[in-house]
C-alpha cells in the first residue's frame, strides 16, 4: 500500500520564502538520515575497491530506471 503524497498550497509564499523553503528541502535531502556504522563504511569501501579493480560490472542508469518503472 502506498501513502498518498501530501499536497500543500504554496502560492501564498513570497519568492524569498519559496527560495528559503527550497534550500531547506535540499539540505534535508542531502543530509544523511543517520551516521553509517563502521561495517557499512567497510562494505562501501570494499565495493568501491571492487569497482575500481574492474571485478564487477556496473549497470547503466537507463537500464536501472527502466527496470524500476511501474508496469501497467
Image (spheres, helix red, strand yellow):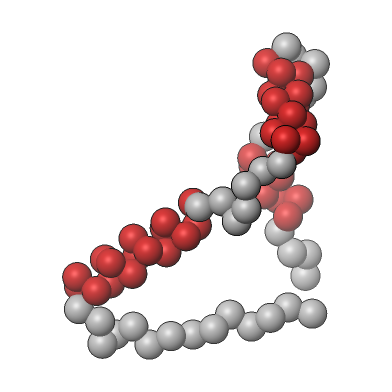
Quadrant of the snapshot with the N terminus: bottom right
67 displayed left or right of 21: right
The quadrant in which residue 22 appears is bottom left
Q: Position of residue 57 (x, y in %)?
A: 77, 24
Task: Give above or below for 31 relative to 51.
Answer: below
Q: Residue furthest top?
A: 53
Front residue of 21 and 37:
37
10 displayed left or right of 69: left
| Residue 9 appears in view | yes
Quadrant of the snapshot with the C terminus: bottom right
Q: Count all numbered tags in the image, as a single digit.
A: 0
What residue lies at 43% left-to-right and 85% top-to-bottom? 8
Front residue of 68 and 20:
20
| Residue 59 appears in view | no
Task: Give above or below for 62 relative to 71.
Answer: above
What residue lies at 74% left-to-right and 64% top-to-bottom? 70
Task: Give above or below for 27 relative to 3.
Answer: above
Q: Position of residue 40 (x, y in %)?
A: 74, 38
What residue lies at 62% left-to-right and 47% top-to-bottom? 35
The quadrant in which residue 60 appears is top right
Q: Position of residue 10 (x, y in %)?
A: 34, 83
What residue lies at 47% left-to-right and 60% top-to-bottom? 28
21 displayed left or right of 64: left
The quadrant in which residue 25 appears is bottom left
Amino acid at each position: 500500500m502506498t501513502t498518498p503524497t501530501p499536497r500543500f498550497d504554496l502560492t501564498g509564499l513570497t519568492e524569498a520564502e519559496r527560495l528559503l523553503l527550497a534550500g531547506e528541502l535540499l539540505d534535508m535531502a542531502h543530509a544523511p538520515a543517520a551516521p553509517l556504522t563502521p561495517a557499512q563504511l567497510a562494505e562501501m569501501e570494499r565495493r568501491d575497491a571492487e569497482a575500481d579493480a574492474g571485478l564487477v560490472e556496473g549497470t547503466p542508469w537507463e537500464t536501472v530506471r527502466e527496470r524500476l518503472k511501474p508496469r501497467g
